[in-house]
Image: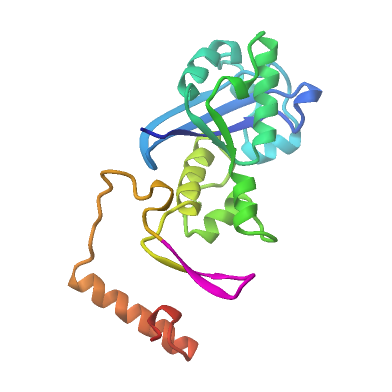
């Protein structure tokens, strides 16, 4: 069975849909069986209202820039068709879903939650994995080594692309992992095939001799700087 996911982000005129603020940009990235497919959806939207200065500082989109863009009503079917049947991944989902529901309510459509398969809040997931740490998109990019140097301003499609990379990094399976059980002080082994991982047809690329040698040199340098051998290299 194929797992289809859509990573979604929006930009808005302000912080509160209840105060009449509107969506001005939607970005979606498709992920199929944990592979980014290259299919995406990106639309700018005319909000028919002014944009708060705080929001403008975040995304840089002015009312004048958006006046020639379509209304949400004009792109709703295309957008909903893209997310139909997918698990939708959103960072801080209540914010985006609140705006989407407000837009759909204006059109007499159902709630967004009922128009897609499921919503997964990646911010909640990140907080579970990294309690007590910063879990903004920028912080997660830094944590997982994902370059966001080109992210000078927020943009819905760019942020969805970064979030797709972050999500895959956060949920990546591993061949074999010894995990210390904090409550019992014992070690347990997580098998490679738990939770259906790896997916069928996964291509495994083995390192060549030069890559293995470079890796060994890197590990030895790290151990030398630390003044002790690595845990995974200890007997």
Q: Give the range drawn in magenta.
A: 179-190
188 in relation to 51, above or below: below
Residue 54, percent from left and from top: 74, 38
Residue 235, percent from left and from top: 38, 86
Choose between 78 and 184: the one closer to the eye.
Answer: 184
* Quadrant of the image occupied by residue 119: top right
Predominant secondary structure, magenta span? strand
Choose between 62 and 7: the one closer to the eye.
Answer: 7
Q: Which residue is drawn at 39% across and 42% down?
A: 34
Q: Residue at x 42, y 53 (%)?
A: 194
Compared across the picture, whether 123 is left or right of 193 comes to right
Count of numbered tags: 0
49 in relation to 51, above or below: above
69 in relation to 27, above or below: above
177 in relation to 74, above or below: below
* Quadrant of the image occupied by residue 113: top right
Q: Residue at x 63, y 54 (%)?
A: 128
Quadrant where the N terminus is found in the figure: top left
């Amino acid at each position: 069975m194929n797992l289809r996911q859509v990573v979604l982000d929006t930009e808005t005129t302000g912080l509160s849909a209840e105060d009449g603020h509107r969506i001005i940009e939607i970005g979606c990235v498709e992920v199929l069986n944990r592979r980014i497919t290259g299919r995406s959806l990106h639309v700018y939207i005319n909000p028919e209202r002014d944009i708060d200065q705080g929001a403008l500082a975040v995304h840089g989109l002015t009312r004048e820039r958006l006046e020639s863009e379509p209304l949400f009503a004009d792109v709703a079917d295309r957008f909903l068709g893209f997310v139909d049947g997918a698990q939708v991944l959103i960072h801080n989902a209540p914010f985006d879903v609140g705006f989407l529901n407000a837009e759909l309510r204006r059109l007499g459509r159902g709630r967004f939650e009922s128009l897609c398969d499921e919503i997964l809040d990646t911010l909640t997931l990140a907080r579970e994995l990294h309690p007590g740490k910063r879990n903004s998109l920028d912080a997660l990019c830094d944590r997982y080594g994902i370059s966001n140097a080109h992210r000078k301003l927020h943009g819905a499609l760019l942020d969805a692309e970064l979030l797709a990379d972050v999500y895959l990094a956060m949920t990546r399976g591993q061949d074999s992992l010894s995990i210390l059980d904090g409550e019992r002080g014992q070690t347990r082994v997580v098998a490679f095939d738990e939770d259906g991982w790896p997916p069928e047809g996964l291509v495994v690329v083995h390192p060549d001799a030069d890559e293995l040698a470079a890796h060994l040199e890197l590990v030895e340098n790290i151990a030398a700087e630390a003044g002790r051998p690595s845990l995974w290299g200890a007997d």
